[in-house]
Image (tube, grey):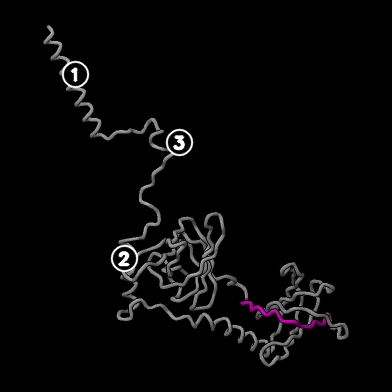
Amino acid sequence: MKVSEISNGSAVKIHAAIGGHNVVLLTEAIFGVSVGLLVKPMEYFGKYMQFLEPSKVEIRNKRDGRVYKFMSTSITPVKTRYGNFHLIRSESALEPENSRRAQRFYMEKLGLMRINGDNINLTNCVVHDISMRGIGLILDKNTWLKIGDNVDVMFRYGPTLHNYEVSTVVVRYFEVSGKRAVGCSISNLNVDLIGLIDSKKKEEHLELDDIPETNLNPAISKAQQVKEMEEDIARDEIPEKPKTITISGSPLAPENLEHVRRTTIRQTKKEEKMAQQAREIENLLDLRDI
């Protein structure tokens, strides 16, 4: 997938460094053109920003709901007949994050665990996230699990506090904000959990789908708008820096370089002509004395 194929209205997040400080800039995709992706303009203290160095970009594509992370080649301001925008360029193909794994949904709900069929000693836990293939559990400080342990998890979720139960097997360890956690695989999903995951998908996509698409000129088609924008981009890009840079007060300044001429060719020729005239006048004076 190319960056120009990102859908109109997709949320764009850019990680950049300004003055040695890391900042996150949020904007929105307008539409793709042949040379990249146009997004709403970004300003910093009243100036259009220009990212000449590669920047980390994160885009949640409105079309498929997936998150794409990549490094931009450049992000530059451009001037068009419809106003000022930023153009994101990238030479690499975009791959969705976690394309090989099931999509995870964060829960952060209190639950109970039954470890290896022990119905007497139930243990508290926090259901951190869930997917079609597994579940993440944050453990109580007094709870210890081994890889391969069978864990039955129970928790309530939703406006009706429906009770969900799932049987899992511990497959890995990790940490969440310094707390011990385990990742567990789910071999068989029941109908309740499938319905829960489906509802979580709808929750995540609701806010994204509510973003209206940007239409710069309703009187013409989107294809015609793209064509006009490409013509404007090819003709004019907003320069963020002066076209010429004056270097002074450094060893690289022209006045400090011996091999750099301080006079123009015209001035040099004029000086040579004046010197020749002076020599001729001197010769005439010498002849008069004779």
Residue occupied by mark 2: 232
Tell me the amino acid under the disc marked 3.
Pro
Residue occupied by mark 1: 279
Report the Cα–Cα distance between label 2 and label 3.
40 Å
Tell me the SS state at disc 1. helix
Residue count near mark 2 (Cα–Cα under 10 Å), binned few <14, some 14–19, many ≥20? some
Residue stretch in magenta: 102-114
Please give the name of the residue rendered at 43% of the width and 61% of the height, measured from the top-left corner: 47
Please give the name of the residue rendered at 46% of the width and 61% of the height, measured from the top-left corner: 45
Q: Judge left or right: residue 107 versus residue 270.
A: right
Nearest to the observer: residue 55 or residue 117: 55
Tell me the amino acid under the disc marked 2.
Asp
Please give the name of the residue rendered at 69% of the width and 88% of the height, measured from the top-left corner: 190
Tell me the SS state at disc 3. loop
Are the residues at dot 2 and dot 3 in contact (C-beta closer than 8 Å)? no
Q: Quadrant of the C terminus?
A: top left
The residue mark sitting in front, 2 or 3, is 3
Please give the name of the residue rendered at 56% of the width and 59% of the height, measured from the top-left corner: 22
Please tell me which of labels 1 and 3 falls first in the chain.
3
Tell me the SS state at disc 2. helix
Residue 244 vertical placement versus 105 (above, below): above
Residue 286 vertical placement versus 106 (above, below): above
Residue 252 vertical placement versus 70 (above, below): above
The secondary structure making up most of the magenta span is strand
Q: Quadrant of residue 184?
A: bottom right
Tell me the amino acid under the disc marked 1.
Arg
Percent x, y of residue 64: 51, 78
Q: Judge left or right: residue 109 versus residue 150.
A: left
**Which numbered tag is attached to residue 251?**
3
